[in-house]
Amino acid sequence: MEHLISIQSALELPAPLFIDLRSPAEFVEAHIPEALNIPLLDNEERAIIGTIYKEISPEKATEEGLSIVAPRLPELYAKLKELSQNNDIILYCWRGGMRSKALCQILSVMGIKHYRLEGGYKAFRHFVLEYFSQPFLQEIIVLDGLTGVGKTDMLEFLIRDNYPAVDLEGLACNKGSVFGHIGYSQAPTQKQFEGLLFSILYKVKHNPRIIVECESSRIGRISLPTSFFTAMENGRRILVYDSLENRVKRLVKTYTLKYTRDNDIELSKALDHLRKRLGHIKVNYLLELLDKQEYNSIVKVLLEDYYDPLYRYPDEPSLNYELNLNAQDMAGSIDKLKSLLNLPG
């Protein structure tokens, strides 16, 4: 028997596993976070069926679609049966129509427990937009500090220990500067970023406060939802500071952790974009250092001449902040942040 379920009810299930039946191209553009893509049609097949639907008839499109999918049913059945053993599987397509409904009817006959998402991915997208259209009510703690002081490291520690923290740069696959994309895979679409952010925030909605790193309203090509960014601007400010030497070491370690030659090529292109700001002589000098892979020297120059004048945060404790964290004591700083998060609402 088929069970139709709303997106809100689906998100409250104890072990939801969303199954996206759309084509790989649709999935890449945007999908429900953590969903598993089991496409009924590949990209080319979907285009063919779409053309038949528009130019001939919906009935003919359905016939052709069934002829393509029918040989794959045994494999689909085996896969979904296995997944349903320990999860509440929720199948969806674009609008909860032909693709998901047809497969759900087959699964009902075969006795596999499942749900069909009412309204499909479109319903999830509407739910996300509605969520961000409202004022953001949780208190946001914002980590300020110069580049390389370890703000992202702190967030990663908190996330690992299941505290309500969000790595916005990690979600956007961009560190928010001319060098921000280096070392990251392809950035998500705006739709997918908003879905990812919503998914994290929805899971911690009962926490009175969350922690993020200070960001502008845009991270690379991604724009933060207005309600969320407004709450960040009005949030509590915490300063993180460290020595220039430690910041250089931290950034070089991060850069070389997943080093590829492509990173140097991208860094060279990014340096060229700074000629107007730093001048030709300095950029040429940095490119010479890059050829020698002298990353410590490159990072030091970029911090002193580009990043620090750009962001202008204090490099020592400041009375303008309610709490100052020395990143040299990373463990102690993490404990202080955890204490803030553990305060009663």
Image (cartoon, rainbow, N blue to C red):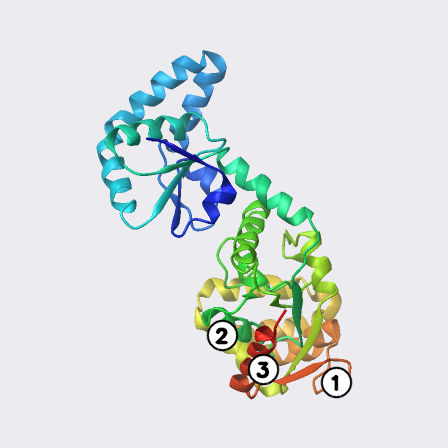
State whether residue 68 is above or below residue 308: above
> Where residue 40 is drawn, which disc sits there?
none
**Which residue is tagged 1?**
318
Whether residue 217 appears in this view of the structure is: no
- Of residues 339 and 157, which is closer to you in this image? 339
Q: Element at badge 3?
A: helix
Q: How many marks?
A: 3
Q: Residues within 10 Å of mark 2 (few under 14, many from 20)?
A: some
Q: Quadrant location of the N terminus?
A: top left
Identify the amino acid type marked 3.
Lys
Horizontal side, residue 67 vs residue 58: left or right: left
Q: Mark 3 = which residue?
A: 336
Dot 1: what SS? loop
- Number of the front mark, 1 or 3: 3
Residue tagged 2: 157
C-alpha span from label 1 to label 3? 17 Å
Q: Mark 3 near mark 2, Cβ–Cβ under 8 Å?
A: no
| Crowdedness near tag 1: few (<14), some (14–19) or many (≥20) residues, C-alpha within 10 Å | some
Residue at 47% x, 73% y is 256
Residue 18 place in picture, x, y as percent: 41, 44
